[in-house]
Structures are given as C-alpha cells and as structure tokens.
Image: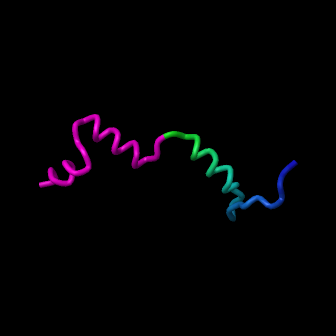
Amino acid sequence: MQNKNKIKTVTGTDIDEVKRLNAQSGLSYNEAKVMLAEQKGFSSDKQRNNIN
C-alpha cells in the first residue's frame, strides 16, 4: 500500500526514494574526482598550483 504523504516532484519522482538510493550508491561525483586525482599523484593543493 502506498503512503499518500510521499513527497514527489511535478513529474512524479519520489524524492525520499531518490535520496535513499543515492545514499546507497557509493561515491559522489566529487568524491570520485578526488580519489582519481590522488591515485594519479595529485592532491587538491597540488592541482591548484600546477595550473600554470
């Protein structure tokens, strides 16, 4: 049975469901960028200083 009090967008997307799925999905886009940069030997400070 569906809860009639669910918050939905104009197009019908269940906002709480999206938040729940996002929380389970792993790294965010920015977290993935930082991880890849660190694996290649860059840190956020080094990255800023190397943009010459």
In this rendering, the answer to whether 6 lies above or below 17 is below
Q: Position of residue 42 (x, y in %)?
A: 23, 42
Residue that appears at 69% across and 65% down: 10
In which quadrant is the C terminus drawn?
A: bottom left
Q: What stretch is highlighted in magenta?
A: 27-52
Q: Position of residue 47 (x, y in %)?
A: 21, 49
Residue 39: in magenta span: yes
Query: Residue pushed farthest right?
Result: 1
Residue that appears at 76% across and 58% down: 6
Left or right side of 33 for 27: right
Q: Is the magenta stretch mostly helix, strand or loop?
A: helix
Query: Residue pushed farthest top?
Result: 39
Left or right side of 14 for 52: left
Left or right side of 22 for 39: left
Residue that appears at 28% across and 34% down: 39
Residue 14: quarter of image: bottom right
Q: Where is residue 37 in the image (x, y as percent from the top left)?
A: 28, 41
